[in-house]
Image (tube, rainbow, N blue to C red):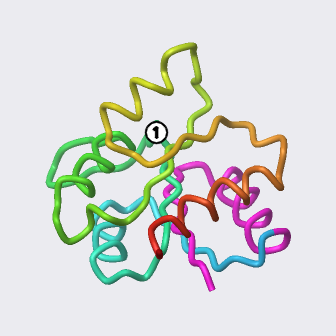
Amino acid sequence: MTTVLIVEDDPINFRVFAKILTKRGGLEVKGTEDVEEVMRIARSREADVILMDVSLAHSVYQGKAVDGIAITQMLKSNPQTASLPVILVTAHAMEGDRENFLKQSGADGYISKPVVDHQQFIAQILEVANKNQN
């Protein structure tokens, strides 16, 4: 069973994503915006894919405020967690943002909020997760 770690600071968005993924996708879901917890879950392989909100308002790591890009960079630069797929999620999608965010962070995919097409959302997450398992 594929487990998705949702890193999201908005409880409503978290619930929406969790519901789509569990009810429509049949996936397991974990959620946290605690960066230490994200790192621990990534290192221990308790998730197959991470859904990472780009703009995290409350996340702090080692005394510094960090956003989803910074957390993804940390995951991707650590050999222990580099292969864990990360999909960025953002509501602030301007033309060119997608490429910049992906290049900056090293993330494996990108989804814009709001999520309109639930099936496509699930398919995109599974595609990234499965690429990693093969």
Which residues, given as a range, are shown in magenta?
1-24
The residue at the far top in this view is: 95
Q: From the top left corner, tell me how far across and down residue 55 is, in percent.
A: 46, 36
Secondary structure found at label 1: loop
Is residue 43 toward the left or the right of residue 118 in the image?
Answer: left
- When asked about the image quadrant of residue 11, the answer is bottom right
Q: Residue visible at 45% across and 68% down?
A: 132
> Which residue sits at x=45%, y=25%?
99
Residue 131 or 59: which is nearer the viewer? 131
Q: Quadrant of the N terminus?
A: bottom right
Residue at (44%, 42%) from the top-left corner? 56
Counting labels gives: 1
On screen, residue 13 above or below 69: below
Confirm whether the magenta stretch covers residue 7: yes
Q: Position of residue 82 (x, y in %)?
A: 26, 61
Where does label 1 land, which residue?
54
Residue 100 quadrant: top left
Report crowding for label 1: few under 14, some 14 to 19, many 20 or more residues within 10 A (C-alpha). many
